[in-house]
Image (spheres, helix red, strand yellow):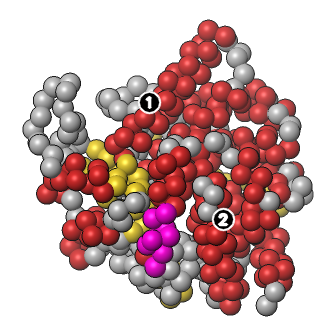
Amino acid sequence: MSIEHIIERAYEILNQSIVQYQGKPIGTVAALKHTHLAAANYEECFIRDFVPSALVFLADGKPEIVKNFLEAVLELRTSERTVAGHEIQPGVMPASFTVATDFDGNEHLQADFGEKAIGRVAPVDSMMWWLILLFIYTRSTGDDSLAKRPDFQQAMRQILHLCLKDSFEVTPALLVPDACSMIDRRMGIYGHPLEIQSLFYGVLRIIHSLLEEKDPESDSSLVNTALTREHALQSYVRLFYWLDLQRLNEIHRYTTEEFGHDSVNVLNVYPESIPDWVIEWMPNDCGYLVGNIGVGRIDFRYFSLGNLLAIMFGLASEEQSERIIRLYEQRWPDLVGAMPLKIIYPAMEGLEWQVRTGSDPKNAPWSYQNGGNWPVLLWPFIASALKTGRGDLAERAFQVALNKLPLDEWPEYYDGRTGRLIGRRSNKHQVWTAASLIVSYKMLENPKMLDLFPH
C-alpha cells in the first residue's frame, strides 16, 4: 500500500468525524462508530483530541473549523458554572462537548466539565490546549482578530488568573489532582505532573503575545507575573525534574533531614525511594524529565507526552532535549517498540498497581494508560525529533506506524511491553490516531510547521 493511499485512508476517517452545528463544522468526534464504541462519550468532541485534527485543517488551509471550535468552546465555558453544588472556577474549560437536539428540533451544545467523566475530575489541560491552539491558529492564519475579541481576551485573563492564583505552594509548578490530563484515570500523578507543567509553560510562553492591555496597570502586572513565573518554572523543571546518571548518583548519596537555605536535598527525598529498574535502565549519555516531584517524592516513571512537549515548547534545555531524544534511540524497544509510542514506562504491576490505580482493570499492566502504546503520541515525537536534528528517528518512527495503523483499523492504543497487541478494549477508527499520522507526514514533508508551536 503506497504512502499516499494510507494518508488518503486517514483523511477518510478525519473527514467522516467532522461535527456539524447549525450548518457549520465545529470539531471532530473522538472515534467513528464501528461495531462498538469503547465509551459512550467517544461520540463527543474532546478539546485535547481535536488538537491534531486542527493542525491538519490549518495545514490544509481550512482554518474555519478551527475558528468555529475555538468559539464554541469559549461559549461553553460560561454555560455551566455549578457541578454537584460546587462552583467551577472561571477559566476552566470542558473536557468535551456534543451537539444535542431538543424536542423542537433545535440544536444546542452540551458540555462535560468532568461531571460525567470517570472519577468526576475537571480537566486542567483543556484550557491550556485551547489557549495554545488559539496561538497556533493566530500564527498559522496571520489573523489576530479572533484573539483580540473582548470575550477571548477575558477568557485568557481568567485562565491566567486561575493558573497564577496564590496557594499554599512555594514552588513555581502547578498543583493539580489525579486524572486531570490525557491520563484521565487514577494513575498516581496527583501533585505536579510533568505534562501539566509543560502545557503550563507553553501558556506562559505565549500569553504576552496574545493578551492586550485593556487596563495597563493590572494587565501589565498580570503579564509581568506570568513572565516571572515562566522563568522560575523553566529553571525549576530543568533542575529538579531532570534525571541522568550524574543526577541519579547525587540522589543515591543524598543526606536527608536537612534544614536551612543551603540544603542540597531540599525536598527531603530518601535514596531508598530510587526504584531498582531505573539504575540499570538509564544509559550513560541520556536523560529525561521525571514524571512528578513533590515533598519526599520523585516519580521516576518516564512520561512521553510531558517530555516531548517540554522539548517542543523549550521547557527542556537544548542539551536536555537532545539527551531525551537519544534516550528513545537507545531504549527504542521500551519507548517505541512495535507501535509508537509508549505513554508511560515502566508499567505499574502487582501491589503498586493495586494501590496507585485502585486495581483499575482497564489500566492493567502494559495496557491503556499504564504502559500502553498510543499512536497519537507520534506527532509530538516527530516534532521533537525534528527540532533536535534527529530526522532519522522521526522517519523511523513514522515508518513503524505507517503500515500497521490501516491494517489494524486505526486503534486507539496497543497493549504489551512493546505494543505488539491491539489494545484489549481499544476503540478502532480512533480519529486522533488517523490525524496524528497525517500531521506527522506533513511535518516530515515541511519541517517549517514547527514554527507554529510555542518555542
Left or right placement of residue 189 versus residue 233 in this view: left
Left or right placement of residue 336 versus residue 107 in this view: left
Residue located 20% across and 39% down the image: 265
Task: Tell me if residue 331 comes above or below residue 91 in the rendering.
Answer: below
Residue located 84% across and 32% down the image: 145
Residue located 72% across and 42% down the image: 134
Name the residue furthest top. 217
Q: Quadrant of residue 434?
A: bottom right
The mark nearer the N terminus, 2 or 1, is 1
**Magenta part of the chain:** 326-333
One can see residue 161 in this view = no
Q: Quadrant of residue 138?
A: top right
| Image x and y of residue 257, in percent | 9, 38
How many discs appear?
2
Q: Nearer the viewer, residue 215 or 421?
A: 421
Residue located 87% across and 60% down the image: 60
One can see residue 233 in this view = yes
Q: Nearer the viewer, residue 6 or 426?
A: 6
Residue type, mark 1 in image? Ala
Front disc: 2 or 1: 2
Q: Principal SS element in the magenta part?
A: helix
Q: Residues within 10 Å of mark 2 (few under 14, many from 20)?
A: some
- What element does badge 1 sit on? helix
| Image x and y of residue 263, in percent | 18, 32
Left or right placement of residue 208 versus residue 258 in this view: right
Residue that label 1 marks:
232
Q: Residues within 10 Å of mark 1 (few under 14, many from 20)?
A: some
Residue that label 2 marks:
391
- What element does badge 2 sit on? helix
